[in-house]
Image (cartoon, rainbow, N blue to C red):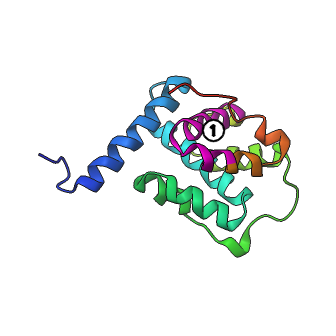
Amino acid sequence: MSATGLEVFDKTLQTTNIWLDEIMADHGPDRRVAWHMLGAVLRTLRDWLQIELAANLGAELPLLVRGGYYNRYRPRDLPTSSRSLEDFLQRVAEEMKSTRPVNPEDATRSVFKVLARHVDLGQSAKVRDALPKQIRALWPESVGV
């Protein structure tokens, strides 16, 4: 029997929990912090990508995660200034300020690892390759499945 009564909700909840478990393996057993880390990095990443690529990545995310990804999304208000690693990490840190302190570079590495593992290989490669070199360096070289 379905836990929620809808198979689509059960599947997205299960997949989201798998992603959070992988983040918690790197940062400790705090699901709330893992959720904030996932959202902070994904929203920052979304805003660093061209709109079409951001939408294609969004389509690959579990339904529950996709909601957090698009939260507060305003394409016309995207940052146009510097696209440095420092700016990226500062934005991640700002997004995570309501949780316990987590190194934004470590958070970014963990979320990138989850994306590399679970998002279609072609799509994740497009996302990685669209990032500035310093940010791309945080993406894992290879991830075991």
* Residue at the left extreme, as displayed: 1
* Residue at the right extreme, as displayed: 82
Could one spot residue 78 in this view of the protein?
A: yes
Mark 1 surroundings: few (<14), some (14-19) or many (≥20) residues within 10 A: many
Q: Which residues are magenta?
A: 105-125
Q: In the rendered image, which quarter contains the N terminus?
A: top left
Residue at image point 48% right, 57% down:
66
Q: x, y (%) of residue 76?
A: 71, 75
Q: Which residue is mark 1?
A: 112
Q: x, y (%) of residue 67?
A: 47, 60
Q: How many numbered callouts?
A: 1
Q: Nearer the viewer, residue 67 or 7?
A: 7
The amino acid type found where label 1 is placed reads Phe
Q: x, y (%) of residue 8?
A: 29, 55
Q: Nearer the viewer, residue 114 or 142?
A: 142
Q: x, y (%) of residue 100?
A: 57, 35
Could one spot residue 97 in this view of the protein?
A: no
Predominant SS of the magenta segment: helix
Residue at image point 41% right, 35% down:
18
Q: Nearer the viewer, residue 34 or 117?
A: 117
Q: Is residue 100 above or below residue 131?
A: above
* Residue at the front extreme, as displayed: 122
Q: Is residue 135 left or right of residue 122?
A: right
Dot 1: element: helix
Q: Is residue 103 left or right of residue 12?
A: right
Q: Is residue 43 above or below residue 107?
A: below
Q: Is residue 46 above or below residue 109?
A: below
Q: Is residue 70 magenta?
A: no
Residue at image point 50% right, 24% down:
25
Residue at image point 55% right, 26% down:
27
